[in-house]
Amino acid sequence: MSAVLTRIVSSRLFWPIVMLLVLVTINVIAFPGFLTITVKDGHLFGSVIDILRNGAPTLIIAVGMTLVIATRGIDLSVGAVAAISGAVACSIILSSPDPGSVGTVVVAVAVALVIALVLGLWNGFLVSVIGIQPIIATLILMTAGRGVAMLITEGQILTVNSPPFKALGSGFLLGLPVAVVIGTVIFAIAALLTRRTALGMLIESVGINPEASRQAGVRARGLLFSVYTFCAFSAGIAGLILTANQTAADANNTGLFIELDAILAVVIGGTSLAGGRYSLAGTLVGALVIQTLVTTVYTVGIPPIVTMVFKAAVVTAVCLLQSPATNAAFGRLRTRLTARAGKGITAS
Amino acid sequence: MTTTLDAPASGPAPGPGAPFRPTKPSVLDRLRDVLTSPKSGPVLVTAALFVVVFVIGGLRYRGFFSGQVFLNLFVDNSYLIVLAVGMTFVILTGGIDLSVGAVVAVSTMIAASLLQSGWSPGAVIPLILVLTSVLGLLVGLMIHVFKVQPFIATLAAMFLARGLCYVISKDSISISEPTFVALAVTRIPLGGGLSITPSVVIALVVVIVAVWVLGFTRFGRTVYAIGGSEQSGVLMGLPVARTKVIVYVVSGFCSGLAGILFSFYTLSGYPLTAVGTELDAIAAVVIGGTLLTGGYGFVLGSVLGVLVLGVIQTIITFEGTLSSWWTKIFIGGLLLVFIILQKVLTSRRRR
C-alpha cells in the first residue's frame, strides 16, 4: 500500500496533477457550473471547453518546446515566430482580391507556415552548425523577430475580414473548437513520432551528451535541425490560431510572453531544463494548469492582468518542489518516519 | 591562458620557462594576440564599431558630430548603463537575469505611487533599493540552494515584478514631487554649452565602483573564477556559494537604481515600462564582449555596448524615415555578429 503511494508521489506527474486538481476544485467552489458542458447547435460549450480552446496555442508551442528542451536547448523565439506567421498570413489575405475565399486562406496559411519553417531552420543552423548556445541563438530571433513582424505589417495592426481564416481561431469541427482539434493532432503526431519510434530516445541521447551520441552514430545535427524546425512550425500554427481568434495581426502583442508560458508548461510538466528526459503528457498537464490558472483568476474576480503574480507563484512552487534539495528533505523525512514506524513494531 | 601570453611583453626577455619561443614576438604578432584574445578582442572590436558608426553618423547628418549628441548617449541611456553593469556581474558567473526590465518597471511604480501618497524621496529611494536587493537575494538563494536554473528563477522574478506593477496600478502615475522633478530637469554644465544630468553622474559612479569591485577585490576575482569553472572555484576554497548569491543581489540593486533613474527620466510610473529591456541589457553586455558562458568580460565593455545601441538609436532618430522597429532588427543583427565573433575568437584560442 505504502509502496504504491510512494510510487505515485515520486511520479513526475504527481505535483502538476495535484496542482491542476486544486485549481479545478477552487473553480468548482467559486463557480458551481464550472464542469458543465452544454451542446448548442451541435457544438460543445462550457468553461472546460474554453480552457481547452484558449490553452491550445500554448499547448501547441509547448509540444515543440518540449522536444527542444529534451535536447538541452531552449527556443525563446517562438513568440516572435508566431507574430511573424500571423503577420504574413494577414498581409497576404488583405492584399488578395478575394479575402473571403478558401483558396486565399489556404495560400496565406501555407506561406506563413513555410516562413515559420525557414525561421526554424535558421535557429537550427545557429545551434547545430555554428554551435551557439540555444538561449542566445534564439534570443537573436526573439529580439529581431518582432521588428521583422512590424516590417511586414508596416507598423499597423492588420484587421482581416475573412470567414474561413476566422474559423481557424473560433470555428468548430466535429463539435469541438478547431483550435482544440489542431492542438490534439499536433500533440498526437509528436507523441506517436517520438514514443512509437526510436526518435524520442535519440532526441534524449542528444540532450544527455551530444558529443557521445554523435560518436555512437546518432546524427545529432540533423536531430537538432528537426526539433528547432518543428518548434518554429508549431509556433507558426499557434500564431495563426491567435491571429485568427482576434481577426487581426498585431506585431507587438501577438504571442507576447507566450515563449515563457510554453517553457512554464514544459517545466511544470516535470521536464528538466537540463535536457535528456521529457514528458509530453507532463507538458499537456502543464499547459492545462497554466490556462486553468488564468481562468481561475478570472472566475474568482481578480483583475486578469495580475495573473503574472500567480504564474510566478506557480513556477516558484513547482521548481522548489522538484528541486534536489526538497527531494532530499522529503527523503530524510520518509526515512525518519519509517524508522519510527519500525521502532513502534519492535516495541510491541 | 592569456597571462602566459602577456608575460613576455612585460618582462625584458623570455625567461627560462619559455625555451621554445625562438624569437621575440613581433608587434604584429602581439597585435594579433590582443585582437584574438577572448578577453580584449571583442571589446576592441566594439570600440572600433562605435567609432565607425559615430563617424558614419557624422558624415551623413549635419549636427551629429557634436559633443552634446555624444553626451546625450549617456543622458538617454544612464538607466541602461546601470542595468548593464548589474547584468555583467551575473553573466560573468555564467548566469542570466531576465527580471531586470520588470524590476525597473516595478521600481518606477513603487516610486510614483509612494511619492503620490506623500512619502519623502529620502525614504522612497532607499526602500526601493532594499526591496529590489531582497528580491535579488531570494532569486540568488533559489538558484543556489534549490538548484533552479537562473533562467527559470529570474523568469519567476520577472512574472512577479511585472504582476506587482499591475497590483499597484493599471494606469500610468505621474510624479510631481519637487525633488524628483528637480533631479529630472537639473543640467550640470560642463562648459562649452555642454551639459549632463545628475543621472549620468550616478551611472558613472556605479560604473567606477563596478570596475573597482571586479578588477581589484577578492569578490571580483571570485566572480571571474566562477565563470571560468565553478567546480575549480569550489576546489580552490573560494566562497562560491556566497558570491553566486551576491551577484543576483547586485543585479537586483542595479535594477532598482536603474528604475529610479528611469523615473527621473520619464517622471512617471507605468506598468508596461521597459518591456524587453532585459534583452537590451543582455545585448549590451554581449556586444561589449562579455562571454555568455562566463569568465571573460569587462564592465567598460558593457558601457561601450550601451553606447553602440544608443548611437544606432540616435542614427535612426536622425534618419527620420527609418521606423523604430529597425532598431530591433539592427540589435538582433549586431548580437548575431558579436556572438559569432566570440565563437571564432574563443575557438581559435583553443587550437
Image: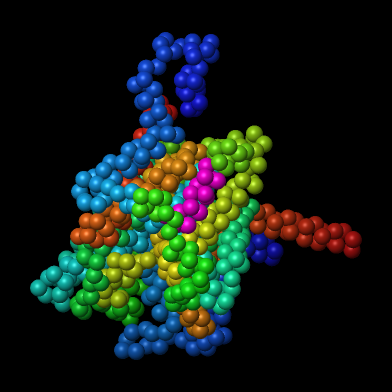
The residue under the point 50% across, 17% down is B11
Please tell me in which quadrant of the rendered image residue A25 appears. bottom right
Vertical position of residue B30 compared to residue A243: above or below: above
- The stretch in magenta equals B196-211
Which residue lies most toward the left here? A97
Figure coloring = rainbow
The residue under the point 22% across, 66% down is A153
Can you give x and y, in whole percent of width and height, for residue B297 in the image?
Answer: 47, 39
Q: Position of residue B217 (x, y in %)?
A: 60, 39
Q: Position of residue B247 (x, y in %)?
A: 57, 49
Majority secondary structure of magenta residues = helix
A144 w.r.t. B181: above or below: above
Find out whether residue A215 is within the magenta segment: no
Name the residue rendered at 29%, 66% in the picture. A251
Q: Is residue B310 left or right of residue B299?
A: left
Q: Nearer the viewer, residue A246 or A14?
A: A246
The answer to whether residue A168 is above or below residue B214 is below
> Who is closer to the viewer here, A297 or B112?
B112
